[in-house]
Image: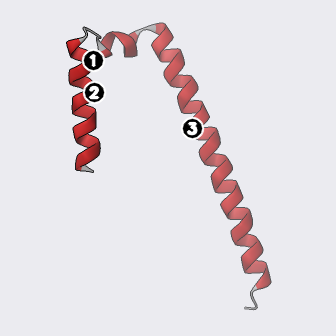
Amino acid sequence: MLRILFYVVVLVLALSFFGVSIQSIVQSPTGQENFGFITGLFMTGWQWIVDAVTTVWHGILAVLPF
């Protein structure tokens, strides 16, 4: 966890060194569209994983005698 925090801080400092404003990227219309697209991809992927695990889990429960 500390390693990830360290990398995030280093990334922010590197972006600041090169003059990149994170706030302007996030608030721009293009940035908003990109973040929305990535969020949608993650949500779709997460739902696919949940559906696959649920299907496998129900298949296991159907085989076990209760």
Tags 2 and 3 touching, CB below 8 Å: no
- Mark 2 lies on a secondary structure that is helix
- What amino acid type is highlighted by mark number 1? Leu
Q: Position of residue 53 (x, y in %)?
A: 66, 62
Q: CA distance from mark 2 to mark 1?
A: 6 Å
Left/right placement of residue 35 relative to residue 6 reads right
- Mark 1 lies on a secondary structure that is helix
Tag in front: 2 or 3: 2
Residue under the image location 25 percent in, 24 percent down: 12
Q: Position of residue 66 (x, y in %)?
A: 73, 91
Residue under the image location 27 percent in, 51 percent down: 1
Residue on which disc 3 sits: 42
Instruction: Determine which of the numbered discs, if any, sits on residue 15 in the image.
Output: 1
Left/right placement of residue 58 relative to residue 37 reads right
Residue under the image location 58 percent in, 24 percent down: 37
- What amino acid type is highlighted by mark number 3? Phe
